[in-house]
Image (spheres, grey):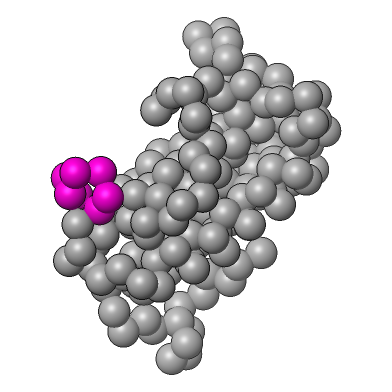
Amino acid sequence: MTSCAFVGDEYRPRSQPAVQLRFLEFPRATAVNKGVGLTREQAAEPPLPSSPRTSALGAVKHLTAVERWWLSLEAGGSDAPSLWPDSPDPRWDPAAGDDPVSMVAACRAEWERSAAALTGPRPEDRTRRGGEFTVRWVPAHVVQETARHVGHLDALREPADGDVGE
C-alpha cells in the first residue's frame, strides 16, 4: 500500500502537481482497502436497494476508469485505450473475472500509468479535450471524485461484513 504519512522531505512535495497527487494517495489507498478481505460475491453484491447496480467491486472498477480517463488520457495525453469505450458514464457492472484481488492490481497499475503520463505536461497546459481544463485542474477533480466514492464504499462495505472506517 502507498504510504500517506507526511513526514520528512520526501513527503513534502515542492510543486503543486506533486502536492495534488500526494493528496490523492490516501483516498486511493482507502478505496482499494474497502475491498480487501471480501469474497468476490461480497464485493460484487449491490447492498443498497436504492442503487441496485452499485457494488464495492463496481465502485473500485469505476475509479480505475476515472484514473485512466482523467489523469492518463485527458491530462497526460496518453494513447492508452479508454476503459469507457462506449460511454462516458459506464455501468459499474463487474465482469465475470473481476474480483477484489484483480481490481486492486488494476488500480495499482493505473496509478503507475497515471504517474508516467503526468511527467510531461505542465500544470498550465490545456487538456486534450478541446482545452476545456488545465492539467492543474485534473488532479484536483480526481481527488474530489475519489474521496466522494470512498464515502460510497463505506456504505457498500459495511453490509458485507460489518467493517467500517479507513
In the image shown, does 32 or 64 lie closer to the viewer? 64
Q: Is residue 95 above or below residue 4?
A: above
What residue is shown at x 75% (from left), y 33% (from top)? Answer: 98
Q: Is residue 87 above or below residue 144?
A: above
What residue is shown at x 25% (from left), y 43% (from top)? Answer: 129
What residue is shown at x 78% (from left), y 45% (from top)? Answer: 101
What stretch of residues is rendered in magenta?
127-134
Q: Is residue 126 left or right of residue 106?
A: left
Q: Is residue 73 left or right of residue 163?
A: left
In reply to whether residue 132 is colored magenta, the answer given is yes
| Residue projecting furthest to the front | 79
Q: Give the dominant element type of the magenta stretch: helix, strand or loop.
A: loop
In reply to whether residue 161 is colored magenta, the answer given is no
Instruction: Residue 74: give x, y in percent of width and height.
Output: 34, 49
Residue 56 visible in the shown view: no
Residue 22 visible in the shown view: yes
Residue 41 appears in which quarter of the rendering? Answer: top right
Q: Quadrant of the N terminus?
A: bottom right
Instruction: Residue 30: give x, y in percent of width and height.
Output: 57, 51
Mark count: 0
